[in-house]
Image: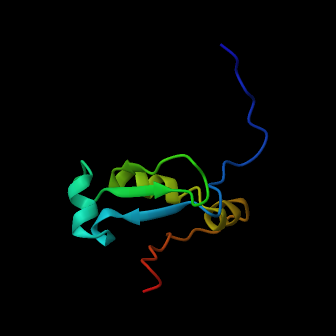
Amino acid sequence: MTQTALSGPLVLPADVLLVPVADLSQAARLQLNCQDGDVAITRPRLRTPSRLVSAGAAELLREFAFENARESVHGTQRRPQIVRDGK
């Protein structure tokens, strides 16, 4: 098994979208095996299919957003905000 050394901060790519399944249409939710609070994680323009993660996993992923990673380097603390369809 090959091990890779990490040489910098772990940062979620800026184009990754975390979409609460509650924001999806009812038809889309019926096609998914999802629970209340689940979040779809997707990256537009890639062939990789979207994945469902729990609300807790999504909150953890938000900690790796670029803005949060930059702020942690500078020693500031800020809670991530959820943005839903520009609302």
Q: Position of residue 37 (x, y in %)?
A: 27, 60
47 or 76, which is in the foreground? 47
Residue 70 in the image, given as x and y percentages of width and height:
70, 64
Q: What residue do we see at 42% from left, 77% from top? A: 84
**79 relative to 55, above or below:** below
Which residue is at a point 37% across and 50% down the rendered structure image?
A: 52
The part of the image, by quadrant, that contains residue 13 is bottom right
Q: Is residue 27 visible?
A: yes
Colour scheme in use: rainbow
Q: Residue at x 46, y 76 (%)?
A: 83
Q: Is residue 36 visible?
A: no
| Image vertical order of residue 57 relative to residue 15, above or below | above
Residue at the outermost right position: 7
The quadrant the C terminus occupies is bottom left
Residue 40, by quadrant, is bottom left
- The image quadrant where one finds the N terminus is top right
Location of residue 36 in the rendering, given as x and y in whole percent from the top left corner:
22, 59
Q: What residue is rendered at 47% in x and 74% in y?
A: 81
Residue found at the far top of this picture: 1
- Horizontal side of 36 relative to 51 (left or right) equals left
Q: Is residue 30 left or right of residue 73?
A: left
In the displayed structure image, the side of residue 6 where residue 47 appears, left or right: left
* Front residue of this view, candidates 69 and 46: 46
**Which x, y percent locates residue 45?**
61, 59
Q: Nearer the viewer, residue 76 or 7?
A: 7
